[in-house]
Amino acid sequence: MPPETAESDQPEQRAAPPSFQASTYPFRFFQQAMDYWIDACQRGILFADVLRQRSNAHLEHEKSESPTVLHFKHELLLDGRKLAQPVNYQLVRILPPEGVETDPAKRPFVVFDPRAGHGPGIGGMKPDSEIGSTLRAGHPCYFVGFLPEPVPGQTVEHVCETEAIFVAKVMELHPDAGKPCLIGNCQAGWQISMMSALYPELVGVLILAGAPMSYWAGVRGKNPMRYKGGLLGGSWLAAFSSDIGHGNFDGASLVQNFENMNPGNTYWKKAHNLYARIDTEAPRFLEFERWWGSPILLNGEEIQFIVDDLFVGNRLSTARLATSEGLRIDIRNIKAPIIVFCSMSDDITPPQQALGWILDMYRNEEEILAAGQTIIYCMHQSAGHLGIFVSSSVASKEHDKFIHNIDLIETLPPGLYEAVFLEKEEGMPCTDLASGEHVLRFENRTLDDIRAYGCNSPNDDARFATVSRISDNWRGMYETFLSPYVRTFANEKAAEALRAAHPIRMRYTAYSDRNPAMKQVGQMAEIVRNNRRPVGTDNIFWNWQEAVSKHIVMVWNAYRDMRDMLVEKTFLEVYGSPLLQASVGLRNSRPYTKSYANRDVDRERGIRQRLHGLAQLGRVGGLREAMIRALLYVVRASKGIDERAFRTLQKLCAENPDLSMTAAELRAQVRAQAAILAVDEKEAMETLSVLLDSATMEGEVAALDVVRKVVEARGEITSEARRRLSQLEKYFTAAHTSFQSRSHDVQIFREENTGE
């Protein structure tokens, strides 16, 4: 999907074509020409009126003290401007629409909107949205937005601290509901990742939707935007833009960057789509433009951090960021499950940039397990960048599923998973246990599965590292020699004039009622609507119009492809130069190697101590621990875990007093037993006898029955999982004269493991 176009759920509707009596062809041709001429003129007037409405709405939107495009009513809870360290962020409570009730005892959700040039509200712009899905599921929902102008002196670090205060406030309002689930859209994704790494105790589940985390990542021929920092000479231009903006950076420049990615859509296709379908497309166009046409400002310090440390430096995904007090920001500190939602059709945040941080942080899957981290990624095939947030189809499937299964997500054992959506089919078992039209399954993955989407070669990483070092040098020279003079001549009035003259803003002023030429357009449009004469799709001139439009888009796309190819080739040649790399210290006796996140002595010592403690913990517990360990023993040989199995486990445990557990107890048991199995699977299974010493035969049979029914609930069973289930049946149902005498049965778990 083009970056500046939301998906339309409205089918094209054209009026029925006029009928013609059999007559001469010239007369019919002339009649169609006249019909098309009237229709085209009417569409032109209506098109101009829609642009006028858009411009007037934009100017009215700017007058609001706290402009937002949220569809839902809301109330202000905390204003960041009134905190000890003021920022322009706000926490609001979303009020459920009429007929929808939320339960304060359910886990709260907090949606963070991106501050990447546009104003807030895209996460709740429609009834079918992240916020809408949350409310329909009965969860309390909160929203973190921002004001158009930053507080002087605020930084990204200050914003992260404020967001932590907001989340703590939500926890205070729902003390018995569990830790909040945080949803970060686009830019807000990396920002709340930083906050979560600094305050991991505040986070229940973290959902990163279309969030760029690893800015160097990408695939040749597909992701030209990542080269822009190098071709502009680094981050000095951001510093210059902030200086002439009197300390503020105009977000309209970021919006323009997005538009320039797809010039065919920006300069022709979007406008033509509105013009050609003016009778049906106007409401959707105006709704989306309320958000797209609301550029905001960022502090110079904020944009400099974003460009230096993220766009060019790529320091977040390699744990090379630190706070002003020296605290290192390391995503590995986040112990809550992390869900990464991305799309193959997202050209703003491609999958490589959304998932690349996992490859930067971890060298193998064992490190993920040892760190106790649960990472889930969901790959959509067709949604564009904005479709991830505003598409009704995405909201009613992916977001709904994640929200309904948040307890399962938090219970998953540590590891790397992919979220897979299976359509319900006739004969599929236990479909009543899965909400909606799909069954959500979490399948185990490896780092190679992420690498398969594409990643940089060592030579490409060396090129981006060269850009980073050159950027630091150029910015240093600009700050030393030019910035003082630019700041001397900069002032607020000049900055306001520059912002008003930006093409993004000029197009709203030009088509508004402030323009005398537009004053009569509204009246003319009303007359046209009362006398509308649209042509049908069989009109030869209509078809010519569509053919010409497609050809224009093809020309623009050819230009875009040629431009992107030239950009990539220039970048690769310039920054691949051995001389240039040597001049910044990257050419020496050793070849350049990718910069992974640094290993931490204290972290690894803590991991070793925890693993040592797990060996002792493996002998502690009773029937519940034995049942969970046995179940996980089979699940480890399965293709994944799905919601049917989890619901079955919850139901069966609730029915048996000896196996009953609260959600928190179940979560703790699953994660603990999974860690014990990961350390030494055979030893963990051989010590089941210790856990079962105090159990009755009836209790063992009941526990085995739970394991069997949970495994069968997900349908297909792999041959290895079936073999392991058979092992458990032999062990649990063997006759024993004493529960202390199971030692002769441990050979059941010493059989050679055979895969499928």
Image (tube, grey):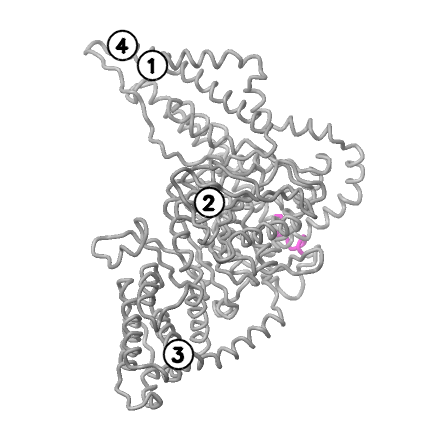
Q: Is residue 578 magenta?
A: yes
Report if residue 641 is visible in the image: yes
**SS for callout 2:** loop
Which range of residues does the magenta coloring cover?
574-581
In the rendered structure, the answer to whether residue 591 lies left or right of residue 264 reads: right
Picture coordinates of residue 467 (x, y %)? 64, 50
Q: What residue is pinned by disc 4?
A: 26
Q: Earlier in the sequence, mark 4 or mark 2?
A: 4
**For the residues marked 1 and 3, what is the alpha-carbon distance in whole angstroms?**
79 Å
Q: From the viewer's perspective, is residue 531 above or below residue 212? A: above
Q: Earlier in the sequence, mark 3 or mark 4?
A: 4
**SS for callout 3:** loop
Q: Which mark is residue 346?
A: 2
**Residue type, mark 4 in image:** Pro
Q: Which mark is residue 622?
A: 3
Q: Nearer the viewer, mark 4 or mark 2?
A: 2
Q: Which mark is residue 533?
A: 1
Q: As rendered, which of 16 and 20 lies closer to the eye?
A: 16
